[in-house]
Amino acid sequence: MATPLSADKLLKALRDEGLHVVEHRSWRTNNRNHKGPWGPTHGVMIHHTVTSGTASSVELCYNGHSALPGPLCHGVIAKDGTVHLVGNGRANHAGLGDDDVLRAVIAEKALPPDNEANTDGNRYFYGFECVNLGDGKDPWPAAQLLAIERAAAAVCRAHNWSQRSVIGHLEWQPGKVDPRGFTMNSMRTRIGKRLDGSPDGPSQPPPRPTYEPFPGSSFFAVGRSSPVVTAMGKRLVAEGCGRYTVGPGPAWSTADRNSYAAWQRKLGYTGTDADGVPGKTSWDRLKVPNV
Ligand SMILES: [Zn+2]
């Protein structure tokens, strides 16, 4: 038995999962609780909207239409990954589905085929509508898929459910095809990894170092031509150590070596320690910008 999350708890769970969440109008009190029960909650259902455009899709899911009053879900997941909350409570998204599927979701077992429409899904499922035309051609951007993964995982985490509590509308109600364009099995795998603390999601590339790493003393030899040498020379000039008549330029030269020796002396090196061949310590202190 799972008590539905309060509006505050749902919002916090989504934000704690790293989602950008927009609270649309009076979503906290927008529901169909006057038409039927809400809860116990047993799972999360993923849909596509068969619409395009964030603002109009969010408004449609908030209001519904004459044949199907809103809210049409709890959250709308936009192409850019933003989650727009539109409902809190019973929502018109799941319709009648298969009681065998519900039992499998509750037990977190493999899903049977959905071949019956005998059970009120709006009572038991959170719903996320994802903006997509559902024509098999409209793309699913990585940011949107990541947001689906995060939103479903957030609700599962709040209820202590596994990824098996997340289903697609097509797995619930006979005749439904949504979501179309990715498989629910692949999404459940992603959600499971996230719940285990090892999400697949696009990891950030390692930050580019601010300064050019030391390329090794042997790099600085006659015949070397590299933008690193130019960048180094410019820094030497900036430090008042430039001994150039032309340049600095990319070809390692006697002027470079004399300039670098001046830098080494400025740092306090003497004798062969100030021979003009860069070493790691003096190089790191020079802070040559990345080329
Ligand atoms: Zn649907």
Image: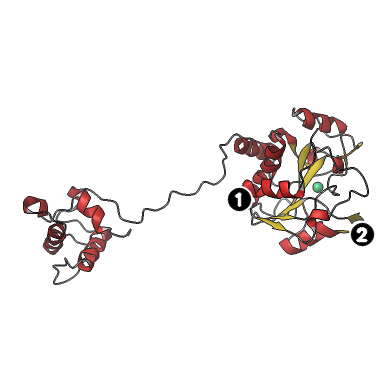
- Residue at point 79% right, 54% down? 28
- Report the mark closest to the observer, 1 or 2: 2
Q: Are marks 1 and 2 in contact (CB under 8 Å)?
A: no
Residue denoted by label 2: 66
- In the picture, measured across the screen, residue 201 lies left or right of residue 156, that is left
- Residue at point 15% right, 60% down? 266
Q: In terms of image quadrants, where is residue 185?
A: top right
Foreground pick, 270 / 108:
270
Instruction: Name the spot of residue 279 as percent of width and height, x first.
Output: 18, 50
Foreground pick, 215 / 260:
260
Q: In terms of image quadrants, where is residue 102?
A: top right
Instruction: Name the spot of residue 201 as percent of width and height, x first.
Output: 57, 44
> Looking at the image, can residue 272 be seen?
yes
Q: Is residue 18 above or below residue 58?
A: above
Q: Assign the C terminus to one quadrant of the image.
A: bottom left
Foreground pick, 15 / 132:
15
- In the picture, measured across the screen, residue 179 lies left or right of residue 96, that is left
| Kind of element beneath mark 2 | loop
Q: Mark number for residue 93?
A: none
> Label 2 neighbourhood size at 10 Å, few (<14), some (14-19), many (20+)?
few
Q: What amino acid type should be assigned to the residue bearing mark 1?
A: Ala
Of all residues, the one furthest to the bottom in this rendering is 245
Mark count: 2
Q: Assign the N terminus to one quadrant of the image.
A: top right
Q: What amino acid type should be assigned to the residue bearing mark 2?
A: Ser
Marks 1 and 2, how far apart at CA: 34 Å
Instruction: Name the spot of residue 242 as percent of width and height, x first.
Output: 16, 67
- In the picture, measured across the screen, residue 207 lies left or right of residue 71, that is left
Q: Mark number for residue 142?
A: 1
Q: In this view, does 290 lie above or below 165?
A: below
